[in-house]
Image (spheres, rainbow, N blue to C red):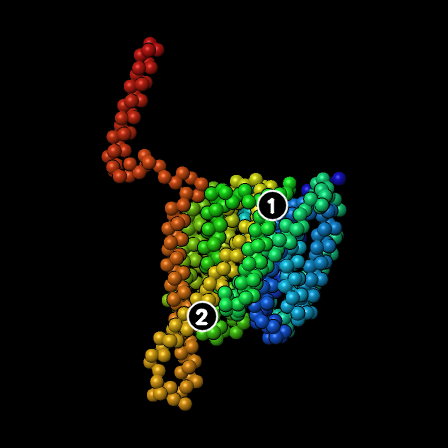
Amino acid sequence: MYNKGLFSDWVPKPVQLLIIVLLLAVAMPLGGVYTGNISFMVGSTGQLTEYFMWANYATTIGMGACMPVVLRIKMRFKVRDKVVLLLVLLALLSYVNGTTTEPAIIIASALVIGFLKMMITIELFLPLMMLMSNRGIFYSVFYTFVLVVNQVSSYYAVEISILYNWQQFFIIASIECLIMALICWVFMHDKYFAMKVPLHYIDWLSILLFVSTFMFSAYVFSFGKQQDWLNSSKIINASVAAFLSFALLSIRQTTLKRPYLSFKIFTKSNVQNGLIMLLFLGMYLGTTSVQNIFSVGVLGYDQLTNAKLNVMMIPGLIVSGIVAIFWFKKEKAIRMYIFSGFASMLGYAIIMYFSMVPEFGFERWYLPMFLKGYGMGSLFIAVWYYTLDKLELDDMLAAIGLVLVWRTFLAVGIFSAIFSWFQYQFQIESLGNLAVYLDGMTLTSQNLPANLKSLQINAILSANKRLFGYITLTGFGVLLYILTHHFGREKFRYPRFVRLINGKSVIARKRLREKNKLAQELQDASGSTL
């Protein structure tokens, strides 16, 4: 027998919804590393920061690799058996990450965690989408909840690391997974979702090429600055390996009867423009590295205080979700909602541009972080909705892995790497400019340390200000692009342009002629009838 739900018939509906929410709260924040913990992991293990950034990217790559095959895996196994096994495996991997100091193990574990947790997430999609028949409302609720949970999880990861150590948060995550596995074993039914399908149709070589492509790319983005980019043979070799892997992946899809990936949807206008908007979103999300340099390097915040800045985004995230629910409920065009998201991000960049001073108070973070939270939430919801709008389920699932990796890894990774490189170059240039005013009279043995520290801070502020200035200028161009984009409607009509040029009098005369013509036609019709 088949059961398209998740739970046994005797489980009340409110209890089912509560368990789904708990599963999302436990599964979605899981990762190989937690960004707030990276500094503690570096200090404890003595490894480079770049290894743990690579592991952070690996989780997203694992999620993207799972998407094209997740529906086939869903229909192959019984719901309870699969979810319980996945939670146990996630608990085991979290425990491994919390007890090892070897970065290679953490990176591999992070990749598998992303792959496994996507299988659990897809089980929760269908019941929630059935509960909210409107896809836009579903995205509004789902992304708001997930983004808020991620910010809260990142904050507590830092707090627990300070109170105890960084391993404890992984142990807590492992225990949570085991508890949820026990709950699912009790409440979930022991039936298949639909007709059982074989797994031998999955092309595992394509999955390996997909992972290889983006893991090599993640190595480039993570280690590029540390290896001095193209001056390093390792960066060049990794770039070539990523390109060759993607070329082989693309060629293989043309020879398969059941391809792992589908590139057909990338010919559609909404997908192409959606990817461009997600790239612009990655530009704004990439400013996190610049913000951290300012908050930690200039303002002197500790890790917990810096983590509180991300918590300040939660009100903006909630407001964006509420606005999105009413927006989709009223079935309004999403152009102005997307515009409001990019405008909020632009407002954040403008405020940060004028805030590059050492006297910046903690209370002045509330407005820019609210705007950043609203912009992030609204763009995650609306741009994802627009990108995947009116796509067939088979085509969407076969390409959503690439779109997911593009949104969460490539777009953010590209701009984070670019900002990191430019920030360093601008610092050097600023120090060179400030050196004009230094001589033996201003730099004495007594005031040398204080002056050098002041010079470094001013160089950082100058570099950050310049970066936010370029981001602001680009942001105005993004807003112009949003205003002129058609969003599925006819973009340009010649008669409207003529009426706009000739003025309202032309419209009035045309309406009068149409009215007289209609009256004449009615008179002629009535005359012939009589």
Amino acid at the residue labelled 2: Tyr
Q: Quadrant of the N terminus?
A: top right
| Quadrant in the rendering for residue 172 | bottom right
The residue depicted at 64 percent of the width and 40 percent of the height is: 257
Is the residue 310 above or below the residue 183 in the image? below
Is the residue 275 above or below the residue 461 in the image? above
| Quadrant in the rendering for residue 149 | bottom right
Can I make out residue 129 in this image?
A: no
- Residue 479 got which mark? none
Which circle, 1 or 2, is nearer the viewer? 1
Bin the neighbour count of mark 1 within 10 Å (Cα to Cα): few under 14, some 14-19, many 20 and up.
some
Describe the element under mark 1 as helix, strand or loop: helix
- Residue 253 got which mark? 1
Q: CA distance from mark 1 to mark 2?
A: 41 Å
Amino acid at the residue labelled 1: Gln
Can I make out residue 427 in this image?
A: yes
Find the residue positioned furthest to the top.
530
Give the mark nearest the N terminus, 1 or 2: 1
Report which residue position mark 2 lands on: 424
The residue depicted at 36 percent of the width and 77 percent of the height is: 434
Q: Residue 301's spot in the image, x, y percent?
A: 49, 73
Describe the element under mark 2 as helix, strand or loop: helix
Is the residue 130 above or below the residue 527 in the image? below
The residue depicted at 38 percent of the width and 46 percent of the height is: 484
| Quadrant in the rendering for residue 432 | bottom left
Q: Residue 337's spot in the image, x, y percent?
A: 44, 49
